[in-house]
Image (cartoon, helix red, strand yellow):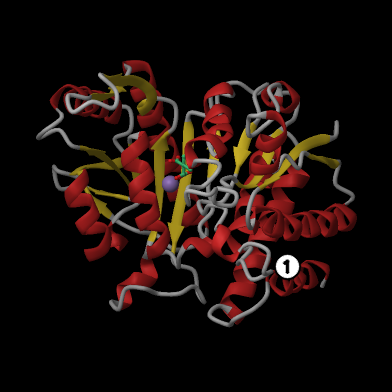
Amino acid sequence: AQSTHVAITPGDGVGPEVVAEAVRCLQVLREKHGLALEWTRFPWPSHAWHEEHGESWPEDALEQLAGYDAILLGALGDPGPMDDSERYLLPDSISLAPLLDMRKGFDQWVCERPARLLPGARQYLKDDRAKDIDMLVIRENSEGEYVSQGGRLRKGTQDEVATQMEVFTRKATERIIRYGFEQARKRAEERVQQGRTRSFRTLDGRTCESQVCVITKRNALRHWGDMYTEAFEEISQEYPDVATHHELVDAACMKFVQSPWAFDVVVASNLQGDILTDLAAVLSGGMGVAPSCNLNPTDPDMPSMFEPTHGSAPDIAGQGIADPTAMLFTTARMLDWLGQKDEALALAGKELFDAVAADLAEHGGERRATREIGEEVCRRLKA
Ligand code: IPM
Ligand code: MN
């Protein structure tokens, strides 16, 4: 097969530390299986780059990354030191901009954030059914509340008005909902293969192997809510084997805590998905274990981007104590994605997932250094 080439952007804070462990695992897997896999590092620490060039990433960053098969990102966000008036030099909105630029520039319209409470992961909920938590939150990643339209009128005055527009298109709505149904089917098939079936009731009393729950706030935000609901109902006709469900976002927050094991695939808007996935991350053991990815499933020439749900955690950066587990799960998902073109990569992804899960099962809850966890996973991969 033609070699697969990944762009690695370690980013800021704990990003480079957790990425180092991912690279270590990739090296082991490449050597072990003779994978046709290469990578190139783009360090670009946003604060230092901003000091020198006045922007957090090179102006042509997207052009530089465009030719790669995928982007593996550690974390972005570096406020830098405080200035004399105790304000951070680099506001979040600037150091994080490249993240949103990549999602937009490469049309990564799907954000997948699985939340499964694996053995060994910290169980925040007391209820024993928490062990059955296994959901996939799919966040619409291209529009909605993140279109960045609006502005400030009469800025700085007592009469100031800030507007922040939300835009939802029928096309983006339909594609994300359809994607949700496809994933629900795929997950049901995988579960059947692994002998762990689940059952969900449809409104007309049938039982299905999988479910899609769509999130809105249609009791208050009607235009968007109604369009989402209509699109959901229409598309669900094509998937009679998948149960459907709707929750208002506020009720969904409650039910994520009360009975998260009842969810399978959840489709949410950009901002609501952002919020729900922090909650879902905690349900599956915390930010230290929660993977994420930003996919463009429609254009094979555009790179998808793989980054853990967590941020750059500047408070613990440089200490070598960040948990690389989320980064390693994310890397496994990247290999799985790249495996669409080269099956050996998919197998390596599965191997990495299993090794990280085994490490978590054995050592979850222990206080370990970043490097220690990476080395232990590598040891398993070599065994
Ligand atoms: C995430 C983050 C980003 C988002 C921030 C850093 C802009 O919270 O990836 O979930 O809101 O999408
Ligand atoms: Mn977030």
Q: Residue at x 13, y 42 (%)?
A: 204
Residue at label 1?
374
Give the left or right position of residue 135, taking residue 105 as reference: left
In front of the other: 86 or 290: 86
Q: Residue 57: where, in percent of width, then height?
A: 67, 32
From this view, report whether residue 11 is shown above or below residue 351: above
Residue 293 falls left or right of residue 25: left
Q: Is residue 78 above or below residue 321?
A: above
Tell which residue pokes out farthest to the front in this image: 84
State which quadrant residue 259 falls in. Answer: bottom left
Which part of the image, by quadrant, shows the C terminus? bottom right
* Residue shown at the point (77%, 59%) measured from the top left: 25
Tell me if 120 is positioned left or right of 270 in this view.
right
Which residue is nearer to you in this view: 339 or 207?
A: 339
Label total for image: 1
What's the residue type where badge 1 is placed? Gly
Q: Does residue 259 appear in the picture of this structure?
A: no
Residue at 33%, 49% in the rendered image: 276
Dividing the picture into quadrants, the one containing residue 1 is top right
Q: Find residue 12 and report its horizontal and vertical position in percent.
A: 64, 49
> Quarter of the image holding residue 325?
bottom right
The answer to whether one can see residue 373 in this image is yes
Decide: few, some or many residues near mark 1? Use Cα within 10 Å; few <14, some 14-19, many ≥20: many
Q: Position of residue 95 (x, y in %)?
A: 56, 39
x and y percent of residue 140 in the render?
40, 33
Q: Is residue 305 above or below residue 17?
A: above
The residue at 37%/67% (across/down) is 132
Dot 1 falls on a residue whose secondary structure is: helix
